[in-house]
Image (tube, helix red, strand yellow):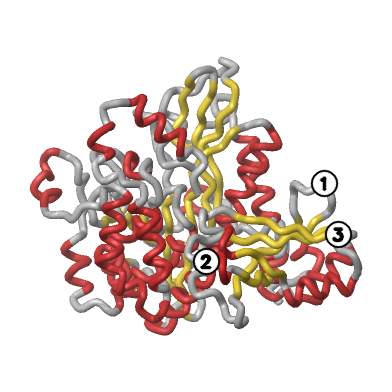
Amino acid sequence: MNNDKLMLNANPIVEALQKPAAEFTKADIIDYIVNNDIRMVNFMYPGGDGRLKTLNFVINDLAYLDTILTCGERVDGSSLFSFIQAGSSDLYVLPRYRTAFVDPFAEIPTVSLLCSFFDKDGNPLESSPEHTLHKAAEAFRQVTGMEFQAMGELEYYVISNDEGMFPAQDQRGYHESAPYAKANEFRTRCMKYIAQAGGQIKYGHSEVGNFSLDGKNYEQNEIEFLPVAVEQAADQLMIAKWVIRNLAYELGYDVTFAPKITTGKAGSGLHIHMRMLKDGKNQMLENGVLSEAARKMIAGMMVLAPSITAFGNKNPTSYFRLVPHQEAPTNVCWGDRNRSVLVRVPLGWAADVDMCHAANPLEPQTRYDTSIKQTVEMRSPDGSADLYQLLAGLCVACRYGFELDGALKLAEKTYVNVNIHAAENADRLANLAQLPDSCVASADCLNRQRRAYEEYGVFSPAMIDGIIEQLRAFDDKNLRLTIENYPEEIQKLVTKYFHCG
């Protein structure tokens, strides 16, 4: 048992059982329920719309509790997923014990667990979101011998009544403190509840976007997570969005993860950071510089970037965020510490300097291994994403780089160390591939590149067909061009998809 992992852990079930969540058993869950007067159990699982669904159980007796935790329950798959027909729609949902948490909003003491889907034969449902991600992680491990880890930067706007006091400076909200930032206390309460539900949070802060409109205050915030195994990363992002929405509802705020909520203001992204571990050691650096393995990983994302938007940018407003000359990317390229590129290599503590000692002279000098902190960041996704599809797609793309002939040369070719939108770099910009500009274009890209995602049985053909059909149904091929100069029409679109993802 690693006491460092248990000490100060925010999850009350971890604290009570004195074991990490990954080691929870059915007996552990039952013991906690019995010893803490828990009266209800919730099963939660993602539907085809990317949101968590909930099934409630009142605990009748110990035998019934054991039954639901062992056998799960039957649900109507056709009401959850468009690819399941009503004539054969029954599915099973089985709880994953490692995801157990105490519901912070329930008046009746409740333990919630995330679930996996199984078909009529008792096999994992091939096209279910979480099983697709599981297959992607396993294929990555088989091909590379490494574990794929990820974490998200979850951006969202909090909308409240504008009281006119201590007005924030328009579009200057980055890391602002109270009283100019009004939603800091709301964000920290969200962070507390997410951590209690098992989320591994890195930090939270106010973001760039803030403005007032029609008597309402719009304030952009961000909660960023720590890198964990990719399946856990998706689970904690799902729970985080659920927590943020529920607390907002409880306090009378509105919240949106929409990629664009009005013209001329900062949109919200869902940047995903990734790294690879082998024997517990980060493989992203080699002798203080980006490793060969990391550059292969980036090369795979360069090739499949156009189709990754099919998982990470799921409605027409996504493509009003992905426009040229703004901070959101439009070109397929990567670079160090460069926010104009698609894949960014963030500042990574690579300098061999003890900054802690420099800031705190009383501290002894140390040789702390900072290489564990290095990641690479994909900047195109937004809050409309299907989290499991997106992380599975990125996992596939990074694996694909290891199977790609000439991956290192491709990485070198697409590397950019300048502001790609500056006038003097126009020739460089002209030679870079572009991201799709609509849901329809993303669907076309996915259709052309689908074999990469279907390899190793990761994405089922039925799932790819369903995503393509869903995207093409928006019929937005020329929409951005048609209405980009008509703010009223854009606002109608924003309102329609305000509560996406």
Q: Earlier in the sequence, mark 3 or mark 2?
A: 3
Residue of label 1: 107
Label 3 amino acid? Ile
Label 1 amino acid? Glu
Residue under the image location 54 percent in, 47 percent down: 223
Point out the image quarter for the N terminus. bottom right
In this view, 307 is above or below 183: below
Alpha carbon separation for disc pair 3 and 1: 11 Å
In this view, 304 is above or below 142: above
Q: Secondary structure at mark 1?
A: loop
Badge 2 local density, few (<14 within 10 Å), some, or many (20+)?
few
Asked whether the beta carbons under mark 3 and mark 2 sit within 8 Å of each other, the answer is: no
Q: Earlier in the sequence, mark 3 or mark 1?
A: 3
In-front residue for pair 179/267: 267
In-front residue for pair 152/396: 396
Which mark, residue 226? none
Residue of label 3: 38
Q: Secondary structure at mark 3?
A: loop
Residue under the image location 58 percent in, 52 percent down: 362
Q: Earlier in the sequence, mark 2 or mark 1?
A: 2
